[in-house]
Every structure is written in C-alpha cells, then in structure tokens.
C-alpha cells in the first residue's frame, strides 16, 4: 500500500507504518467521511485510522470467522462503498455483499446473498443513486437494492442492458445523478429514477373462451336449449347454461405478449369453491363438471412478470338454469298447488260430510216418517187383527157350539141308530136260523147280518169316543181274578186262531191275583189290540198275550202285553197310529178297519188311569204293552159303580170279526165256480178286494154275463190276459196292485189293450176321475154307485164293440182302423192287415204263418184277432181277401178267375160263393152292375 503525493509526485510506503499486518493483494480502497481508509484484499478487510500527522494510528483487520454467523462472509473483497448515510458496503467475490455494522468481536456485518434476492454472489461494483437505492453490478445481472424494504430488483439483457456480466469497479454516478455501469459488452448509462419497470406492469386478464363439453360456445347459439352468451365471450359479463350442460371450461389470458411465461394466474368460481387455484401460464383454463343449478361468479386474475398479483380481476357471472322442477317458481307453484289441493280436499270433505250429513238427516227423517207410517199401519193392522181375533174367537165359539150341536145331533142320531139296528139284527138272526129259509136267501141274509153288526160296532165305538170327549165316560171298577178274566178274553179268539193257523199263547201272572178293573173297558182294549194283531199277522204267525206285574207288591200295576209276529210298523208311523182315523196304507195289510181302534183304545186306557206303549220292527212284529193300576186304592169311590159288563157280547163280536177277516183273507172262499156260465154270453171280470161287495156285484151281473172274479189288480191282470173278458170292472183301492195300475197295465199290453175297463172307487173327487181316464179307463163310476147305472155302462161298452164288429164286417173298404179303440190296437191291426195284404195271393196263408210273421204266439194272435174283430182269424183273412177282390173287380179288364187267384183262392167257384155270402152278389153280377153304372151294392 502506497500513498501518492500528487504535488511531490512521490509515493509514501504506508506498509512501513504498519508493523503487525502484511497488507497485500489489494483489490479496492475507500476513504470514509471520517477519514478511515478501508482496504479490500484477498485476505480480508482492513481499516486504517490516521493521526494528526496523517500517520497510521490504528489498523483493524476483519476476517471471515467460521464460528460466527455475523462475521464478514468472505475474505476476498472486490469492492467497497460508503453510502450517503455513511454506511460501509463491502462486495465479495462469490459471497454477496456485507454491510459493516460495528467492529466489536472482530467485526459485525449484515450480509446479503442470492438467497436474499441478489442476481449473483460475485460482486463487481456497489454505488448509490440519488433516490437512496444501492446499485450492485454482479457477474450476472444488475441489481437495485432497497435497504429499507430489503428488496432487490434485478435487471438483465432483457431489460435492455448490454450484457449480464459486469466489470470490476466499472460504475459511476455523475453529478446529474446519471448512473454508468460497464460490462462485457459496453456501457449502460441511465437515470435510475426514470427507469420504467415494465415488469411491474399488470396486464389486464380476459376470459378468452368458454366451452361446453369442450366445444367453444358461440353467441346466440343454443346449447341444451339455452343461449349461453349473447355476445362474444370476451365482451360478455353473463353466461347462462342449462343444468344439462354438465361439463364446462373457461380459458383466460393476460394481455402481455412478451413475457407471458413468467405470469401466473389464479381463478376461483365463487359460489362453488372458496380457494383460488393458482396455475402457470401454460395452464390457462379451468374445468368444472356437474355444477348444481344456481348462480356463480367465475373470477380470474394474474401476476405481473415479477410475480406480483394485480388487482385486475376478470369475472363473469355464470347461471346454471335448473330443470323446471327445480326452479323456485316451480317449487312455489307446486307448493301453491299442494296447498290449494289440501284446501280443496278439506273444503270438499267438509262439503261432502255436510252433504252426507244432510242426506243422512234426510234419510233419518224419511225413515222416521216411514217407521211412523208403518207404526200407524201396524197399529191399524193390530186393531184389525184384534178385531179379527175377536171375530175368530166369536166364530170359534160359534163353530164349537155348532160342532157341539152337530156332535150332539150325531150322537143322538147314532144312538137312535142303535135301536133300529138291533131291531134289524134280531129278525135277521131268527130268519137265518129258521128252517124254512132257502139257502140262497140265507146267504144274502148273512151278508146283511154281518154288515149290520159291523155298523153297530162302529156306532158303539163312535159313541164311546163322544162319551170320553164329553167326560161322561164312567169307570165301573169291580174285583176279578186277573188270570181268569184275561184268559177268557184271549180264548174267544182261539177258534179264529185255529182257522188262520196262528199260534195264540196266553202267559198268566205267576200268582193268582185279585185285581180291581173296569172289565168292559179292559175287554174292549184287549179286543182292539188282539183284532189288530190278527189283522196284521199272516197265517202261521204267533200271537202272545202276557200278564206281568211291576216289581211292587202287593200288585198295584198290571201290564198286559199283546205281541205278534206280523208285518210290524215303520218307525216314522209308530207315533201316528194312536191318532184318530189314522191308517197305514200298504199293499199287503188287511183292508178291514176304520183307523178308530187304537185311538179309542188309548183313550179308554187313559180313562182307566193307565198307559200304552208300542214297539215294533217292520217284518218281525209288534208288541203293545198296556199298564193299568189294579189296586182298589187307585180309584175314587165314584168309580165303583154298578158293573155293566156282559161277557157274552165278546164271543159274538169276535165271531163277526172272524167272518169278516176270513172273507178277506182268501178269494177261494168265493170261487169262480159259484157263478153260472152260459155259452156265448159276454164275460165280465170283477176285480174287488172286498169279498162281500165282489160277491154282491158278481151275483147281480151273473144274470146277464158270465163272470170272472179277482181280489186284487195283480190276479185281475193275470185272469184278463188268459181269459180275454169283454169288460173289466175294477175297484181302485186294493192291495198288491191298485185299480189304476191294473188299468194302465191292461191298456199297455197288446193281449189285453182292447178290453174296456170300468173303474169303481169311493174317491169321488174329479181329480181322480181324470187320473182314471188318463190311464185309459173307458168309464168311471164313483162309489156308492147305482147298480142299474153300472149295468147300463157295461152293456153300452159291449154294445159299442158289437157295432164296431158289424161295421168292419160289412164295410166294403179295407179299413181295419174302425176296430181299434186305442193306438196300440190300431198299430196291431195295421200290421196284421199289411202282413195279409203282402201275401194275399198265397192260398196257404193262415193263422200259423201270420203269427210267425207277426212274431207272436199263434194262440195269442188267434185270441187277439177274435177279440178285436169278433171273427176267427180264418174269417178275418177271408174278409180281407174279399175286400181286396172287390177293389180289383172295379177293373173290368180282370176276369173273375184271375181275381180269385190273385186274392189267394185256388178255386174260383169257392171264391164266388164266399163273395156272394159276404156282399149279397156274385162277382160276375157285381161286375155287371158296375158296367150298367148302377151302384152295385146299394
Ligand atoms: P184300524 O181300524 O185300521 O185297525 P187302528 O187304530 O186299530 O185302525 O190301527 C191304526 C193302524 O195301526 C192300522 O191301520 C194298522 O196298520 C196299524 N196297526 C195296528 N196294530 C198293528 C199290529 N199289531 N201290527 C201292525 N200294524 C198294526
């Protein structure tokens, strides 16, 4: 280090004044305002102070101290500078700049390097402009340092400088404040205060494009039904898109075309996000997908080239139009509609409830009125019914009294019948017993006697009923021996039992007992039960009467059982048999009876303070059990009246009953042979189950007709089909097969269909008459019938048939229809006639060949033809042959022999004889008459 004296033109060796330090490799020097000399070397920084004699008084050496962070950054010093405020700045070679702070601790410096903003750490010059900025030239770039803000601003070739590399100590400021810096490529001079920092310019940002699904949006074009922008995007402030535009993108740019790479951008979609997105200049777009409908603001801003954010923000309003159902107006409308509906529904409900209420009220009123009306009607009806009831009661009373009157009258008259009946019976009995009476008269008288007895019995039964009804039936209790008394009654039936081969048993009480009973009533009861048993038990059956007591002793109740092995009674009919006039209708039971017996028996038993029970098995038999009290104590004193019992009466009664029963039980009793048969008289078949009536009718008709008899429809039919009667007279109510069934069978079977049927019945109703005629009955007579009328009917039926026979015989036409009275016969006759006509030229044609053709037996054909035409079949065939020849004779071309042959006669003479017999003229005479056009057979 030397000091040059300008006047003396000499050097003063300063180094000699410094003993402790070797100052060499000096790069730069600086005198500060207070007179210190700062020396920058490659071995640190020295500061030399001088005394008054301008001799070095003090030397301070500042070196980099690795242990301290605030020591100088490097020992290689390149430049030194004192600023306007007196601060010393030190530039280093590779370690930035240092500012001297104090000399304590070997020197305290504040350092600035590239880390703080320097463009390069190799420093060439440090200077200060008039504005107080520190200017630093470096190995790469010029730098302006603001000490207050500690901010560096660097300038490069791009800022218009000659080069980025500068020279040592090549910096100067002139008096105007113009700064000169020298570098590798020359010199730059400038006024620092007039530097326009282009980089600090913030260029306006604009939105350059808007895309929907990556397609640039054009003005006034609809995208998903919406015009997005009306003007070009850069001029627009509002974008409207449909909710359907799910992907959109914005593109933007700052209007700096030189340095756009150093610009940064930031964007934000307000309403969608809160944070700005920073992007570099090569990513100048923003993409959004699935934006909810609503209003957004898209904002974008940029930095200047220095990276400072400008306040200039481009923004556009983005409206995503919602679907109509998400629009507010739609929601409001919906709300309004819902509210309206609710209101309407409420009003409607209220209205309908009110209407219903009104309706109900109306209905209630109506119903009430109706009920009132009905009530009134009912009341009216009630009074009417009451009136009617009263009338009925009155009427009933009248009926009862009329009935009473009638019954009284009936009882009285019945009573009146008894005397005359007795008066009839007695003389008849004496007549029957008289030796002078002829047998035939005796027979008739017996019939009269029997029926008179029956009538008397019936009248007695009816009077008993009446008595019981009127409470006039008295008990006549007396003491008898039980076994003896009952056995006597049973014994009266023993002869009937023998005749019917019925085993009659009596089982007495074990001990002989005296009992208290009304003998007449017990006898009547037993008679009824036993007669029923006989009526309903077939021959060879068993009837048993058994006495047995209850368990008590002495004997208080006695039981009498009457059991038979008869036909029995159905379970359903059991409760009915004690009803008055109830009879079981059956094909096999005996028709004797009135239906009074059991009902009277029951009343009599009840009158006797007893009871009756019945058990029965159909087909096996029945058992009636009568229980009666038999002790003296059981009866009141009034019951012990004078006995009215006549033991002899029973024997007669049973004998009458036996007669009647036996007369029904077999037809053989009144056999066919009893009636006289005279040849050629018409035959009448009488079908009637009542022997007496049958015999009576038969006896009367026998005077004019031959008689056949049957006791029921079944035997009637078999007799009719083997005997071909001319007329059938039949009853309707009969066992086995009734009259209607018989008639139907007769009329539908070929053998018998021609026989006229006359039905007799007690049923006089017209309904039955029709039923009778429907079955094909020819005539119908209600019972009781007038006998003359019956005879007239029979003779007319026979007469009609006779007329038919004659008509057939003498008519010239071949018409057999006239003989038929029903379709079956008509058919039969048509068939026979056809068969004959088919073989009319066959002389061999006879009954046998005809029967073969007709497929019926010869006998049947014979009988049937005979009955239908009253002609033997040979005559019938001849009749047809002759009628046919009559037809042929009308053709004059035929000669008589030809005709004779063609109608089956081998001998024309025989034919002529027969012809003459039939028609009264010979065939030739007949032809002559024909030719003279006279009616030949007038
Ligand atoms: P009826 O005069 O017809 O005998 P009842 O009153 O004596 O009348 O009897 C009523 C009916 O009871 C009869 O029609 C008969 O069919 C039936 N009946 C009575 N007793 C017997 C019996 N022992 N066996 C079968 N049936 C009987």
Image (tube, grey):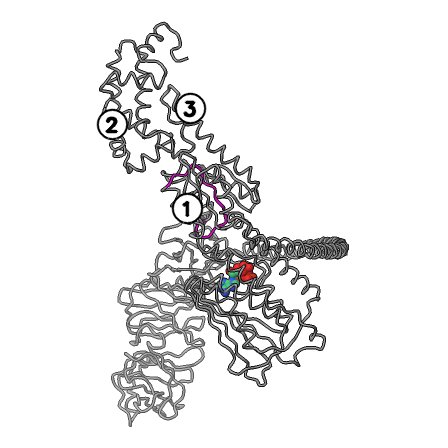
**Which label was assigned to residue 673?**
1
Q: How many marks?
A: 3
Q: Quadrant of the C terminus?
A: top left
**Which label was assigned to residue 845?**
2
Q: Which residue is mark 3?
A: 807
Mark with earlier residue (2, 1): 1
Classify 659 as above or below 856.
Answer: below
Q: Is mark 2 within 8 Å of ligand 1?
A: no
Residue visible at 41% across and 78% down? 83
Q: Most prominent secondary structure in the magenta stretch?
A: loop
**Which label was assigned to residue 857?**
none
Mark with earlier residue (2, 3): 3
Q: Secondary structure at mark 3?
A: helix
x, y percentage for residue 110?
Answer: 38, 83
User: Residues at badges 2 and 1 in contact (C-beta under 8 Å)?
Assistant: no
Whole-angstrom CA distance, mark 2 to mark 3, is 24 Å
Whole-angstrom CA distance, mark 2 to mark 1, is 39 Å
Looking at the rendering, the stretch of residues picked out in magenta corresponds to: 723-737
Q: In the figure, is residue 263 to the left or right of 519?
A: left
Whole-angstrom CA distance, mark 3 to mark 1, is 35 Å
């Amino acid at each position: 280090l030397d000091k040059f004296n300008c006047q003396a033109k000499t050097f003063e060796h300063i180094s000699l004044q410094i003993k402790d330090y070797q100052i060499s490799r000096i790069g730069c020097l600086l005198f500060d305002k207070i007179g210190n000399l700062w020396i920058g070397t490659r071995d640190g920084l020295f500061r030399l102070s001088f005394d008054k004699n301008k001799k070095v008084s003090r030397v301070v050496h500042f070196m980099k101290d690795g242990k301290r962070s605030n020591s100088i950054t490097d020992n290689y010093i390149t430049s030194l500078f004192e600023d306007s405020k007196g601060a010393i700045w030190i530039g280093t070679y590779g370690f930035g700049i240092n500012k001297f702070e104090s000399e304590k601790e070997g020197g305290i410096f504040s350092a600035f390097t590239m880390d703080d903003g320097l463009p390069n750490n190799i420093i060439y010059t440090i200077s200060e402009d008039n504005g107080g900025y520190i200017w630093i030239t470096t190995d790469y770039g010029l730098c302006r340092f603001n000490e207050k803000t500690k901010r560096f601003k660097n300038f490069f070739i791009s800022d218009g400088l000659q080069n980025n590399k500068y020279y040592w100590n090549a910096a100067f400021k002139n008096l105007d404040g113009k700064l000169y810096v020298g570098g590798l490529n020359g010199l730059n001079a400038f006024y620092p205060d007039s530097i326009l920092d282009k980089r600090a310019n913030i260029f306006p940002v604009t939105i350059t494009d808007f895309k929907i699904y990556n397609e640039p949006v054009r003005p006034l074009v609809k995208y998903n039904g919406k015009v997005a922008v009306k003007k070009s995007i850069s001029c627009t402030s509002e974008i409207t898109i449909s909710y359907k535009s799910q992907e959109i993108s914005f593109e933007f740019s700052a209007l700096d075309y030189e340095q756009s790479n150093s610009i940064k951008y930031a964007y934000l979609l307000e309403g969608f996000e809160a944070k700005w997105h920073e992007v570099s200049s090569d990513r100048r777009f923003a993409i959004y997908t699935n934006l909810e409908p609503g209003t957004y603001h898209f904002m974008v801003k940029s930095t200047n080239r220095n990276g400072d954010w400008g306040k200039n923000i481009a923004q556009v309003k983005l409206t995503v139009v919602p679907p109509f159902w998400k629009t507010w107006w739609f929601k409001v409308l919906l709300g309004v509609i819902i509210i309206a509906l609710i209101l309407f529904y409420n009003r409607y409900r209220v209205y309908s409830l009110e209407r219903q209420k009104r309706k109900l009220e109306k209905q209630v009123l109506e119903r009430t009125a109706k009920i009132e009306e009905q009530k009134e009607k009912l009341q009216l009806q009630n009074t009417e019914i009451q009136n009617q009831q009263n009338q009925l009661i009155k009427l009933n009373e009248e009926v009862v009294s009329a009935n009473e009157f009638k019954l009284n009258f009936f009882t009285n008259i019945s009573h009146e019948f008894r005397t005359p009946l007795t008066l009839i019976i007695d003389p008849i009995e004496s007549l029957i017993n008289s030796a002078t009476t002829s047998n035939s008269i005796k027979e008739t008288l017996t019939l009269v006697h029997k029926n008179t007895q029956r009538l008397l019995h019936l009248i007695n039964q009816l009077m008993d009923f009446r008595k019981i009804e009127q409470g006039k039936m008295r008990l006549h209790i007396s003491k008898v021996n039980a076994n003896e008394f009952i056995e006597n009654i049973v014994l009266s039936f023993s002869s009937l039992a023998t005749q019917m081969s019925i085993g009659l048993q009596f089982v007495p009480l074990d001990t002989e007992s005296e009992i208290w009973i009304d003998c007449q009533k017990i006898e009547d009861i037993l008679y009824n039960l036993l007669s029923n048993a006989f009526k309903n038990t077939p021959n060879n059956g068993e009837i048993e009467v058994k006495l047995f007591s209850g368990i008590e002793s002495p004997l208080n109740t006695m039981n009498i059982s009457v059991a038979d092995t008869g036909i029995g009674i159905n379970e359903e009919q059991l409760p009915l048999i004690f009803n008055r006039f109830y009879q079981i209708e059956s094909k096999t039971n005996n028709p004797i009876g009135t239906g009074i017996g059991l009902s009277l028996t029951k009343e009599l038993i009840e009158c006797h303070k007893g009871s009756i029970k019945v058990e029965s098995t159909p087909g096996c038999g029945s058992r009636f059990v009568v229980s009666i009290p038999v002790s003296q104590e059981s009866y009141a004193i009034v019951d012990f009246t004078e006995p009215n019992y006549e033991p002899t009466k029973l024997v007669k009664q049973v004998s009458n009953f036996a007669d009647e029963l036996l007369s029904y039980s077999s037809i053989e009793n009144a056999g066919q042979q009893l009636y006289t048969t005279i040849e050629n008289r018409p035959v009448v078949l009488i079908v009637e189950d009542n022997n007496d009536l049958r015999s009576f009718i038969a006896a009367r008709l026998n005077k004019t007709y031959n008689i056949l008899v049957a006791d029921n429809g079944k035997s009637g039919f078999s007799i009719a089909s083997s005997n071909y009667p001319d007329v059938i007279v039949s009853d309707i109510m009969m066992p086995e097969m009734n009259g209607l069934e018989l008639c139907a069978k007769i009329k539908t079977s070929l053998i018998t269909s021609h026989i006229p049927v006359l039905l007799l019945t007690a049923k006089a109703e017209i309904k039955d008459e029709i039923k009778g005629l429907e079955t094909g009955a020819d005539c119908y007579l209600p019972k009781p019938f007038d006998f003359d009328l019956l005879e007239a009917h029979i003779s007319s039926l026979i007469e009609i048939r006779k007329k038919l026979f004659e008509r057939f015989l003498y008519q010239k036409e071949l018409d057999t229809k006239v003989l038929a009275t029903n379709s079956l016969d008509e058919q039969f006759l048509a068939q026979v006639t056809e068969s004959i006509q088919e073989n009319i030229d066959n002389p061999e044609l006879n009954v046998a060949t005809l029967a073969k053709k007709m497929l019926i037996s010869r006998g049947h054909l014979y009988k049937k033809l005979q009955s239908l035409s009253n002609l033997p079949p040979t005559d019938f065939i001849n009749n047809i042959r002759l009628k046919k020849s009559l037809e042929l004779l009308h053709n004059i071309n035929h000669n008589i022999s030809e005709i004779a042959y063609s109608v089956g006669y081998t001998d024309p003479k025989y034919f002529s004889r027969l012809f003459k017999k039939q028609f009264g003229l010979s065939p030739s005479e007949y032809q002559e008459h024909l030719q003279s056009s006279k009616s030949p057979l007038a």
